[in-house]
Amino acid sequence: MKTRLLLFFSVFIICITVAINAKAQVNINDSLALVDLYNSTGGPSWIDNQNWLTQQPVETWYGIIVIKSRVSVIALNNNGLAGPIPSSFGNLANLSNVLLYNNKLSGSIPPELGNLANLSSLYLDNNELSGGIPAELGNLSKLTSLTSSENQLSGSIPAELGSLSKLIYLNLGVNQLSGSIPPELGNLSKLTNLELNNNYLSGSIPPELSNLSKLLQLDLSANELIGGIPPGLGSLSKLTYLNLSVNHLSGNIPPELGNLSKLFDLELHNNKLSGSIPPELGDLYNLYYLNLSDNQLSGTIPSEFGNLYSLYDLDLGFNQLSGSIPPELNGNVFRLSQIKLNNNHLTGNIPPQLGDVSYLSYIDLSNNQLTGNIPPELGNIFYLSFLNLSNNQLTGNIPYELSNFLFFELELNNNKLSGDIPILTNADYLDSLNLSHNQFTFDGLEQLAQTFPFAKYNNQAILRPHINGNAISVSAGGTLSNNTYSWYKKGEAGKTKITGDSVFHPSESGVYIVRVQNKIANHLNLFSDTISYTAPVALNAIVAGDEQKASNSGFTVYPNPANNILNIHTGNSASFSLLDQSGKVLLAKYITTSASMNVSQIAAGLYYLKNNSTNAVVKIIIER
């Protein structure tokens, strides 16, 4: 107790000294309140504490304005205040403006602030305040601005705030407030801004908010609100910003919202809204942002959206919309920069009219059921940098008109695209390129892989093998010398590997499949369908009747596989023939003990060396 008395008298003496030396003596209660504020919020550590607790006049203290010996304004925003607001703050009876935002104030908002009968603005944003909002703030009959966003305030919003008849600006966003929105807020007839976003508010949106006829901005986003959107909000004729996103709102979008002719930004995304999109929204000629994504909306995209001449960003993604993309989204919507229609059930072709929207930079039509070709008219969009058409059923080639764009992302995966791939010229800008799961071959992919080593192009066309006589062949595109063909017989281990030649000569009847690899586009394996092959009769006879004699043939052959020279060693003199798989004699030679056979002119493949004296046969593989 003695320590507290000494502290009080010390502070009292300081205030008396300040008051005596001031040109206009400041009220002693005001001086004491300022000293409390200084001591409570770490005054010595403030960014600027010029003249505080000195013998200089109070009106010279940083951030203080004095009128007729009473403190009128405290402007200590962005000044490093840390700690609680003292309850003696409520003694500053003539205080009109308080600016304490962007500090580290903690603790609760003192209910004594409700005594500041002359207060017109209270800015407490971006601090660390906690606890509830005092109901006593409802006594501030002259208050025009109350902002305490970005704190840690909890509890409910006091209904008493609805009695602040002069309030123009109310921002309690980004806190931990809970409970319902008081319908009494609908009494704030002069209110132009109401921001309650990023809290835990629940219940429905009070229809009484439709009485706020002067409202310019309404933000209730990122809460836990349920129920429908009140149709009466469509009567707020001055509204320019309406954000009800990230809640649990359900039901239809009221067509009355189409009456908000001054609306600049409409955000209803991440709710549970259902039904069709009202065509009346096409009357919002001043609309710049429209985001209805992540709902359960169905039906078609209104053609009336072609009337939204000011629209910059259209996001209807992650709904259940069906039908085609309206061709009315054309050059009339000339400001449109971003269009996101992804993750719906849209069908039909991509309208070539999109190519008339010259300022488009971002197009996302992915995860729909679109068909047809990619319109070459998209090449008219000078600023296009993001194009995502993945997960559709698009066919045909990639238009060469897209080759000169400065793409940052190009996603065309999971379609049925084929043919040549245009050489993209923006290697320095492209961050993501995905052509996987289409029907391309190595044509074009070699150049793509060299220019964009990060590109995704796996899982492409299933090749169709062809039989011609005793040969199976496939066309995999690309440079033939870069391709390696691995032929497999179904049901058997092992493979026949051929490089630079797409023709395979099977030695036996069976079901075959091939895997093709390219040493440049090495992230892709092309596979074929299976194909049934029946070996010619002559060859079958050789294999079935004579090959079993090879084990006791009495001669050896090396190297096998061979390249240019085939060395044959036999204990007896005999005539030898090199046969192809049809049984045709390609080379013949009479050998006594040892000799060589030149096979340099024979194509790579599988052959048979036959001892004509004993009919013994050995398989020979020639490689190149």
Image: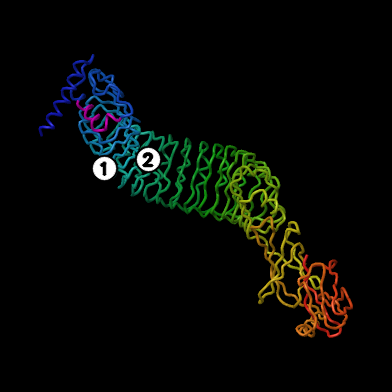
Look at the picture and state if 22 lies above or below 352. above
Above or below 510: residue 331: above
Q: What stretch is highlighted in magenta?
A: 32-45
Magenta span includes 39: yes
- The N terminus appears in which quarter of the rendering? top left
How are the colours assigned in the image?
rainbow
Residue 619 point in image, percent of width and height: 77, 77
318 is within the stretch colored magenta:
no
How many tags in the picture? 2
Which amino acid type is shown beneath numbered disc 1? Gly
Rendered position, 337 above or below 609: above
From the image, tell me which residue sits under label 1. 131
Residue drawn at the location 49% of the way across and 45% of the way down: 291
Q: Residue 210 carries which label?
A: 2
Lateral position of residue 173 relative to residue 470, left or right: left
Image quadrant assignment for residue 394: bottom right
The quarter of the picture where residue 355 lies is: top right
Q: Quadrant of residue 442?
A: bottom right
The secondary element bearing badge 1 is classed as strand
Q: Which residue is drawn at 55% across and 47% down?
A: 340
Residue 386 point in image, percent of width and height: 59, 45
Instruction: Give x and y (percent) for residue 88.
Output: 20, 31
Residue situated in front as seen by the camera: 550 or 128? 550
- Horizontal side of 519 relative to 162 (left or right) equals right
Badge 2 marks a residue whose secondary structure is helix
User: Which mark is nearer the camera, 1 or 2?
Assistant: 1
Residue 537 at x, y percent in the picture: 81, 81
Up/down of 444 relative to 616, above or below:
above
Q: How far apart are marks 1 and 2 (CA)?
A: 30 Å
